[in-house]
Amino acid sequence: MIRLLRLLCLVAVLVLACAAPAAAHNVSAGADLRIAQTIAGMEVTVVIKGTTRVPGPLRIGVIAFEPAAAVPIDLRVRSVEDGRAVTGVARPALQDPHYTELRVERTGPHELTLRAGDEVAVVPFRVLVEREPWTEFLIYGGFFVAGLLLVGGLLTGALARPGRAMAVSGGAAVGVTVAVMAIVFEPMLPAGPPDGAAPVVTSQARGRPFVQGRVETVPARPAAGEEFTVRVDLVDGSTGRPVDDLAVHHEALAHVVVTSADGRFFRHVHPLRTAPGRLEVRLRAERPGAYVTHVELEREDSGGQLLTGRFSVGGEADPASLGGGAATSADGATPGTGREPGAPPRMSPAEPVVGRPVTVEVDAPGPVRPWLGMGGHVIVRSQDGDFLGHVHEMGSGGSRLRFTFSFPEAGRYLAWAQYALADRIVTVPFTVDVAEAAR
């Protein structure tokens, strides 16, 4: 009996010692992957549904946020490991997307190519399938061994002999005990990585370094009214190689905010990955002047990062674009900016002070639907463009949105509240004057 107890203790130790490590960052089998993209003038979210078996179907849909988003998007899914590819077509839909079903033959790294018009994006992702828990082997194996010993003992008459009966009973007890212990300990063990997950990197225990980013426009000096490209090149400073391990955060590989110096121009867009370490998005500015670009991104195992770039737009303004107000006014819509007429947001306290939380309330004209995983966004920029802040709706629900923000310095700030209705994204510009704290 003492030997049996020692054996059971050894089994318990082995069960705990063999626990698999937790799944890697940003990896979840069975969960949908949602990636925002600004492509062919459309703001869309690509949804890759989680799959439960491979070989098997992979469903991909595209959710649009504007009624004009009717351009079909060609899809191509390619396995990085064997090069096998399948193709299909997705049509953006405002509410419930029609999912295109493609067949994948294996788990692991894949690339989703999106093509709309002459724009192409290549989105890396992984096909993940949950592995069967290894403890099931112990559970079923333990009961099987116990049953086999008991049945075998009865058939051979071993139970008629005390010595053999003790051995058979002890073996059956061990099998049952192993199975029961596996059942008891299974909820306490961390889940192992799914099939197809990336290898766990142990050489960078302290995380990867921040990226070195270059933000530029193509052409270098865009002309007012003409399309140009904002290009972001990401490089690892320690190796000089392109950085291609961005984590999807807030349903995008990166968030790009482009504003004019006076705040009349505002775009919050989501660039396309056109090559390893390269992100691009096409824009059009109707006014000449100075512009600033802010890029929010997150490298896996590194944390969030903000890159900044500046450029100038030349030429002459389009007369039709001169009627819009600056960010100091929200009483009229400006064509091409996504701004909506309506009452400006309310702030509490009405006169913000440095370092103290301010609550911003925005009334939407109808039910709000999630965009980028949130009910709404407030983006704040200092007047000189050196600072950018980004906060999310507090989850109050309904058509009244609430945000909380603390301003780092005194001065004037340009701000934009954004939310999505059933058929469009609404942008409400406003300004905030922040005073110094009383001494």
Image (tube, grey):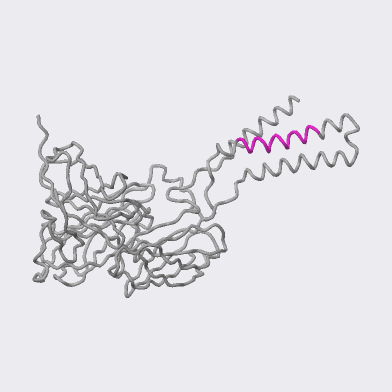
Q: Nearer the viewer, residue 23 or 69?
A: 69
Q: Position of residue 168 (x, y in %)?
A: 82, 35
Q: Is residue 135 above or below residue 264?
A: above
Q: Is residue 277 left or right of residue 19?
A: left
Which residue of the protein is positioned furthest toward the bottom in this rendering? 117
The number of callouts visible is 0
Check if residue 180 falls in the magenta segment. Answer: yes
Q: Nearer the viewer, residue 209 or 434?
A: 434
Magenta-drawn segment: 169-184
Q: Position of residue 3 (x, y in %)?
A: 74, 27
Q: Residue at x 20, y 59 (%)?
A: 258
Q: From the image, which quarter does the C terminus lie in?
A: top left
Q: From the image, which quarter does the N terminus lie in?
A: top right
Which residue of the protein is positioned furthest toward the top in this rendering? 2
Q: Nearer the viewer, residue 221 or 29?
A: 29
Q: Residue at x 62, y 33 (%)?
A: 13
Q: Nearer the viewer, residue 50 or 219?
A: 50
Q: Quadrant of residue 407?
A: top left
Q: Quadrant of residue 139?
A: top right
Q: Position of residue 63 (x, y in %)?
A: 37, 63
Q: Position of residue 110 (x, y in %)?
A: 47, 63
Q: Is residue 113 above or below residue 372?
A: below
Secondary structure mainly formed by the magenta segment: helix
Check if residue 331 falls in the magenta segment. Answer: no
